[in-house]
Amino acid sequence: MRMGKWPMLLALVMVTSLLGACGNGKAESAATASGGGKLKKIVIAEPLHSTGYLPLYVAQREGFFEKRGLDVEVIQAAGGAHVAAVVSGDAWGVIGGTESNALANNNNSDPIISVVNVVNRANVYLMAKKGTAPASQSPEDLKAFLQGKKINAGRHGGTPNLLTRYLLIQLGLDPEKDVQLLEPADGSTVVTMVQQGAADIANGAEPQISDGIAKEVWEEPFYKFHDLGDFSYSVISVKKSTIEKDPATVQSFTDAIVEALEVVQSDKELAMNHLKAEFPTLADEALQAAIDRAYTDALWSLDGLISEDALKHDMDVMIQTGIFKGEYTYESLVDMQFVNNAKK
């Protein structure tokens, strides 16, 4: 027997209400909070376009943000401007290291807080001009090899630069005297500077690594900083005031990232398809090498959590290199309530 128009509509409303009442108790989504329908536009600042940020791009491309009421735009802000964009209000959030937030939070009445992990390893590698790698990975051979070299270390104050300095200090070398550190703000110069002989060694990540190998500028990296273990290298951070005033949006964004992290781990074919879409100029061989490296080196966080060890390893580099002076606490830099909610 067919139902009339109004009884059918009433039944649909009742079913929808019941489904809503059976929720899991999470904070309401941004779409619900804003009245539904229109997507809420937010901007995430990134320091460069990186294959390491693939889970963020997957969340965009797979509609994980959109289904939670968000329209997320990612903009590039090089030279350290990615954090400044959040401080100024030009961006809602930033993807980058927690240590950058620690520096920006000095004398900042509205500190930047990390809410979800993306890249949980120090995604920095050292490459030497082809045919000039060190004899071995021993501290003695590394020290002898690095002594006197011209190293493209990246922007001063950036994490790749700090990690390079950290390694030199650990090996007993003075970064200011025993090597020549080149510190261009533009990360895209990594391959070119070694190719043209301006640098002997470069630090970098994908897609630069595969690009340099394809152009026969260098071979596989001779040193990998991911061996430091858990490291809050690329996390999503927002202002404390955003957490306090609009927790629903932070929760919706975090839920989308956690879903993307799970998908990237479980569906490598999907991950590769989105990598190709984000980096259409990279050769298939370079793309395959980049994604293989990410999985082999356990680059991406499994669940979005930022552990105390991840923060400690990150901040230890800051302290050992003398960039950060003073004290910090896990609670002042990290807030895992949204990740914990997403896991329920």
Image (cartoon, grey):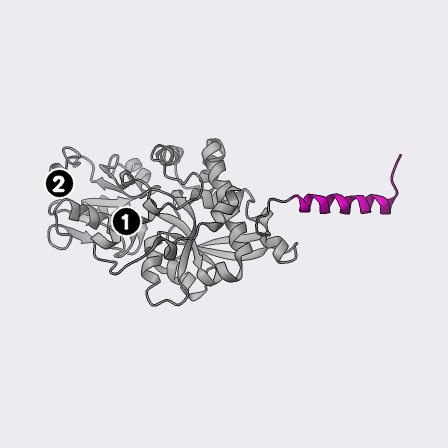
Estimate the x, y position of residue 78 in percent, counting from the top left: 36, 56
Up the image or down, 301 lies above or below 237; here it is above
CA separation in Å, label 2 and label 1: 19 Å
Q: Main secondary structure of the magenta part?
A: helix
- Mark 1 crowd level (few <14, some 14–19, many ≥20, 10 Å Cα): many
Up the image or down, 242 lies above or below 212; here it is below
* Residue 57 visible somewhere in the drawing: yes
Magenta stretch, residue numbers: 1-22
Q: Residue at x 55, y 57 (%)?
A: 41
Residue that label 1 marks: 160
Residue 240: quadrant of the picture = bottom left
| Amino acid type, callout 2 | Phe
Estimate the x, y position of residue 191 in percent, counting from the top left: 27, 45
What is the secondary structure assignment of the residue under circle 2?
A: helix
Q: Is residue 222 left or right of residue 230?
A: left
What is the secondary structure assignment of the residue under circle 1?
A: helix
Could you tell which of marks 2 and 1 lies nearer the N-terminus?
Answer: 2
* Residue 161 visible somewhere in the drawing: no
Estimate the x, y position of residue 130 in percent, counting from the top left: 20, 36
Q: Which mark is residue 145?
A: 2
Q: Residue at x 40, y 49 (%)?
A: 235
Q: Nearer the viewer, residue 143 or 206?
A: 143
- Residue 4 colored magenta? yes
Estimate the x, y position of residue 198 in percent, counting from the top left: 19, 49
| Amino acid type, callout 1 | Pro
